[in-house]
Amino acid sequence: MRRGFADTWVFAFLACAPGVLGQVGATAPRPNIVLVMSDNMGFSDIGCYGGEIPTPTLDRLAAGGVRFSQFYNMARCCPTRAALLTGLHPHQAGMGHMTGRPQGRPEPWRGELSHRAVTIAEVLRAAGYATYMCGKWHVTSEEWAEGAPANWPRQRGFDRFYGTITGGGSYYDPVTLTRDNTRITPENDPEYRPRHFYYTDAISDNATRFIAEHTAREKDKPLFLYVAYGQAWANVSNTPFREYKHWVHEGGIATPLIAHWPAGIRRRGEIERQPGQVIDIMATCAELAGAKYPTQFQGQRIQPMEGVSLVPAFAGRPIEREAIYWEHEGNRAIRMRDWKLVAKGPAGSWELYDLARDPAELHDLAAPDPDRVETMKKKWDAWATQAGVLPWLWKPPYGSEK
């Protein structure tokens, strides 16, 4: 059966041994790290996840590494990006809802990447990495800042940037197209003018140019490259899983993850079935880079990292984690081992599923197992209070559900 998910994300995590990308970082003892993210794709659009369309490059990476079968996003585009970049839950990163929202909201809902968080680029650059980004930023409401932007990629740890600041837009003339801190168009870009401009090609071309320039100028440094594609559509075929974009049932949060690292992952073509979440990417990158996650950064006290490193899972060892949490627009969930407690909407009742036996969330076990519901609900309540989810903005207030 074809498994498609509306608005899932694809993460291809590549940790390359020195010299694998040409001669990049040829003398560096730590791996080069390439993180590729694509949103609004169907889970099975990739060939190695059952897709009908050939994706030979991704399939080859999967054949030489590990595919995660139970990896999760945060149900929406910019909350997922904020969590990916910071290792924090979206609310802690200032992205409890979306960018472009009314000003004056408390920080968890401000739609602006928090300065009480650090990005992977900020952490790795402090450890000696050269840092690059190509693609869609979409974690600031400061989309049209001129002169001195405060929260664009160059201000958040990236040495070079090519891409768009805002969310969607034309693939032929993308709005907010930017090189470093300068707004450009396909016609006036001094560095890149193909005969026929198409945004996804431009992202790939500029990513490879950054690698080539790094090789020529800074080959003694390892690199971190974040490539973020943003699709303009969402796959509607989410069978057999429930719901889609912005819900936190499985159809809205399931995500492929390919981890490929020839020098560090001995498993080849295997499937890793331990659950993981986008907040784990920060901890993973920091461990691979030998980087220290700070408690203070640029005069700000930094929130503790929430994710856990996936490095043990690369070798088939267990990840130590008690629970995984979600909240978006009142949709909320907690997963503990194979059990998932989930609710749809601010007034929705809690539903309970055994994902080992019922991954499609068809058989609600809340009524016959009220003790488990109460235990997991208390865990979610405590997390939501600690992470800035509660009190939330939605109507009715939390606790009014039946």
Image: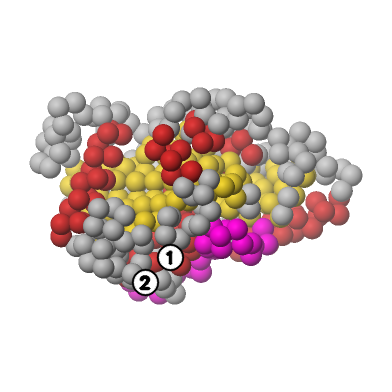
Between residues 122 and 375, which one lies in front from this camera angle?
A: 122
- What is the spatial separation of the Cα atoms under label 2 and label 1, in whole angstroms? 21 Å
Question: Which element carries disc 2, helix, strand or loop?
Answer: strand
Residue 317 is one of the magenta-drawn residues? yes
Please state the extent of the stretch shown in magenta in the rendering: 296-323
Disc 2 vs disc 1: which is toward the camera?
1
Q: Identify the image quadrant of the C terminus.
A: top right
Q: Identify the image quadrant of the N terminus.
A: top right
Question: Residue 89 placed where, x, y %?
Answer: 53, 56
Q: Label 2 sits on what residue type?
A: Phe
Residue 358 is one of the magenta-drawn residues? no
Between residues 231 and 10, which one lies in front from this camera angle?
A: 10
Question: Which element carries disc 1, helix, strand or loop?
Answer: helix
Picture layout, residue 172 above or below residue 13: above
What secondary structure do most residues of the magenta stretch adopt?
loop
Between residues 107 and 323, which one lies in front from this camera angle?
A: 323
Which numbered disc covers residue 329? Answer: none
Which numbered disc covers residue 288? Answer: 1
Q: Earlier in the sequence, mark 2 or mark 1?
A: 1
Name which residue lies at 63% across and 53% down.
274
Which numbered disc covers residue 297? Answer: 2
Name which residue lies at 73% across and 50% down.
338
Question: Residue 99 placed where, x, y %?
Answer: 41, 44
Between residues 154 and 132, which one lies in front from this camera angle?
A: 132
Residue 102 in sight in this render:
no
Q: Is residue 136 left or right of residue 352?
A: left
Badge 1: residue crowd in 10 Å (few <14, some 14–19, many ≥20): some
